[in-house]
Amino acid sequence: MARESPAAFGFDPPRGTSHPNETGDYVERVLILLVFACVLLAAVLVSGLANRTILSTSVLFLVAGFVLGDGVLGAVHVAADDDVVSLLAELALFSVLFTDGMRVALDQLRSAWRLPGRALLLGLPLTLAVTALFARYGDPLGTWRHRES
């Protein structure tokens, strides 16, 4: 089995450095992934407790992000356009969909497909269209105008 390089995950060290740890950006990205993995492990460990309360394990990620981010400790700095943000978003989406898929029985899926089917076939395209229209014409941050020029 071929081993993937860190560059496959957006963690390639800048050119001209002899060792990846010479750059703060590389170390910061690895730190963010390490923090994410630790919080994910903690969420798995307390998931049984969370099922008996009104809180979900998502709150754990929210609190960890606030405490470790610029809000309190400032240990982890993440900009919205960092590659690691999209990577973590994909990992989070995967974990949510995977756990939801584990909980659904085939009998439940066969008997109750109409409402989710309507939401998927009608609601999703409608939501995408409204969001795209708002982003294009109600663009308060000027993101679309910035990309066109």
Image: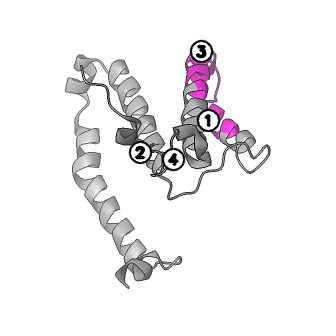
Which is closer to the viewer, label 2 or label 1? 2
With 11 as the anchor, is 54 left or right in this view? right
Q: CA distance from mark 2 to mark 4?
A: 16 Å
Quadrant where the C terminus sits is bottom left
Q: Which of 149 and 99 lies nearest the eye of the viewer?
A: 149
Say which label, 3 or 2, has the lower sequence index.
Answer: 2
Residue 143 seen anywhere in this rendered image of the structure: yes
Q: Residues within 10 Å of mark 3 (few under 14, many from 20)?
A: few
Q: Could you tell me residue 117's position as x and y percent?
A: 23, 42
Q: Could you tell me residue 123's position as x and y percent?
A: 30, 54
Q: CA distance from mark 1 to mark 3?
A: 13 Å
Q: Amino acid at mark 4?
A: Thr
Please give the residue where the numbered disc 4 appears in the rendered image.
17
Please, is residue 61 above or below residue 82 in the view?
above
Magenta residues (range): 38-64
Please give the residue where the numbered disc 1 appears in the rendered image.
61
Q: Amino acid at mark 2?
A: Gly
Please give the residue where the numbered disc 3 appears in the rendered image.
45
Say which label, 2 or 1, has the lower sequence index.
Answer: 2
Question: Label for residue 10?
Answer: 2
SS of the residue under disc 2: loop
Colour mapping used in the image: one colour
Please, is residue 148 above or below residue 49 in the view?
below
